[in-house]
Image (spheres, rainbow, N blue to C red):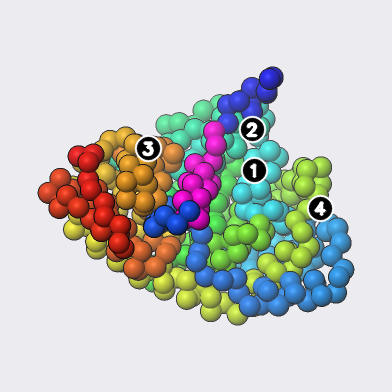
């Protein structure tokens, strides 16, 4: 069978594969504890469901304009004004099938084959694969100090004549680290001087803890028809609406026009039913967002405290998101091998760090219950600690450690 070079070069989404494997095992009755996912456990806001139900009851669910419905775009405009301090025009907005698609279409709109797009490491798993799909080159930038916060020195060392864009994801998946206002200001200025696009992947921008405040890129970037800032966002994370698949981009009118043409020739537009739900969430009561933040902050504290007491484990306390990027190199340097061991032997799902560009780490999600966090870490400790008892009971099932 003949397949395209690009098609053959793509890797399977590790995060989606893990979710599938864990779901299959759970359906078989296995006592899975999922500490690898990025999906809120709560329900979609009532305002979203009510708005979608009203449209569904009308039985009038038709084609949407390729850049999104008027209602959805107006909701995005209002949201952007409230949280970013600028009021984009309708021609600055496109609504897409999730933030992931908005990001991909933005990259298609601005990158040519062999162009380079840079992003700090560790990074979200899809950045490099998206670049491959359009013939561009994704380049990860490691911090010189080995940490999770890049510096301008780290980034500028990788910028070359083919560099056309930089992606910043703050707070970051997989580390939960929020980049400083000083860094955002510096990178805005650098990109402006170099004529480089700055793509802000802001899907977690309000999921911040310890009274930290969201940093708007437009505090430092001028937003006009020549702006090379592109902001990506969506309803999946904040509003527990992962299955609704509604995201958006804010950019200059020319970029939005090209993205709209791409969308028109691919999926046409998101479902107007789901856009109505997204508008309901954005315009409705925001108590679910605050409740989610409080739950996640509490869960982060529980996970951090338990892991901090785990001998040999090194970790950085997240500023936001659902994730903690944990250094397990004292026990196993191969993160795929470690993640496989934990899933096979003690039925705990974590994400191998190599998928995010850093070996020896695993991404652990605290977007679950406190009980599952405590049980999951107890199982991990039993699996790795050579001084632990040789047996562990999970319910009535007795596990005997035969791999140490």
Residue where numbered disc 2 is placed: 133
Q: Is label 2 in a helix, a strand or a loop?
A: helix
**First in sequence: mark 4 or mark 1?**
4
**Which image quarter holds the C terminus?**
top left
Q: Residues within 10 Å of mark 3 (few under 14, many from 20)?
A: many
Q: Is residue 289 left or right of residue 57?
A: left
**First in sequence: mark 4 or mark 2?**
4
**First in sequence: mark 1 or mark 2?**
1
Residue where numbered disc 1 is placed: 104
Q: Is label 3 in a helix, a strand or a loop?
A: helix
The spot of residue 90 in percent (x, y) is 77, 61
Question: Which of the 4 quarters of the picture holds residue 378?
Answer: bottom left
Q: Nearer the viewer, residue 87 or 246?
A: 246
How far apart are the two marked residues, 4 and 2, measured between alpha carbons? 22 Å
Q: Nearer the viewer, residue 371 or 311?
A: 371
**First in sequence: mark 1 or mark 3?**
1
Q: Which mark is residue 66?
A: 4
- Number of the front mark, 2 or 3: 3
Query: Residue 159 in magenta?
Result: no
**First in sequence: mark 2 or mark 3?**
2
**First in sequence: mark 4 or mark 3?**
4
The spot of residue 206 in percent (x, y) is 50, 65
- Number of the front mark, 4 or 3: 3
Q: Is label 4 in a helix, a strand or a loop?
A: loop
Residue at 69% over, 53% down: 97
Pointer 4 with pointer 3, Cβ within 8 A: no
Q: Please state the extent of the stretch shown in magenta in the rendering.
A: 11-27
Residue at 52% over, 70% down: 42
Q: Which mark is residue 336?
A: 3
Residue at 52% over, 44% down: 17
Res 322 visible: yes
Q: Is label 1 in a helix, a strand or a loop?
A: helix
């Amino acid at each position: 069978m003949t397949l395209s070079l690009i098609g053959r070069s793509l890797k399977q989404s590790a995060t989606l594969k893990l979710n599938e494997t864990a779901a299959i095992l759970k359906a078989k009755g296995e006592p899975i504890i999922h500490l690898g996912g990025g999906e809120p456990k709560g329900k979609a806001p009532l305002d979203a469901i009510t708005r979608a139900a009203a449209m569904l009851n009308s039985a009038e669910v038709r084609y949407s304009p390729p850049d999104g419905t008027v209602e959805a775009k107006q909701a995005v405009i209002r949201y952007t004004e409230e949280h970013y301090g600028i009021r984009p025009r309708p021609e600055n907005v496109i609504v897409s099938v999730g933030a992931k698609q908005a990001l991909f279409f933005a990259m298609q709109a601005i990158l040519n084959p062999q162009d380079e797009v840079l992003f700090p490491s560790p990074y979200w798993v899809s950045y490099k694969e998206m670049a491959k799909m359009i013939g561009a080159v994704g380049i990860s930038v490691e911090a010189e100090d080995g940490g999770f916060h890049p510096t301008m020195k780290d980034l500028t060392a990788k910028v070359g004549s083919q560099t056309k864009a930089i992606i910043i994801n703050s707070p970051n998946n997989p580390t939960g680290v929020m980049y400083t206002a000083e860094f955002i200001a510096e990178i805005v200025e650098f990109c402006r001087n170099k004529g480089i696009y700055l793509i802000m992947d802001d899907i977690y921008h309000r999921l911040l803890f310890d009274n930290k405040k969201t940093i708007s890129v437009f505090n430092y970037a001028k937003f006009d028809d020549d702006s090379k800032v592109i902001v990506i966002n969506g309803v999946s994370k904040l509003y527990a609406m992962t299955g609704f698949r509604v995201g958006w981009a804010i950019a200059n009118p020319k970029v939005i026009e090209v993205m709209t043409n791409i969308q028109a020739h691919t999926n046409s537009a998101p479902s107007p039913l789901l856009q109505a739900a997204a508008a309901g969430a954005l315009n409705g009561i925001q108590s679910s967002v605050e409740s989610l933040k409080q739950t996640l902050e509490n869960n982060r504290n529980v996970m951090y405290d338990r892991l901090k007491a785990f001998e040999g484990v090194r970790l950085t306390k997240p500023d936001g998101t659902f994730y903690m990027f944990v250094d397990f190199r004292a026990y196993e340097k191969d993160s795929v091998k470690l993640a496989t061991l934990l899933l096979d032997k003690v039925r705990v799902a974590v994400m191998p760090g190599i998928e995010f560009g850093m070996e020896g780490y695993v991404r652990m999600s605290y977007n679950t219950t406190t009980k599952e966090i405590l049980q999951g870490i107890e199982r991990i400790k039993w699996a790795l600690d050579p001084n632990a008892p040789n047996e562990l009971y999970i319910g009535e099932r007795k596990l005997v450690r035969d791999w140490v």
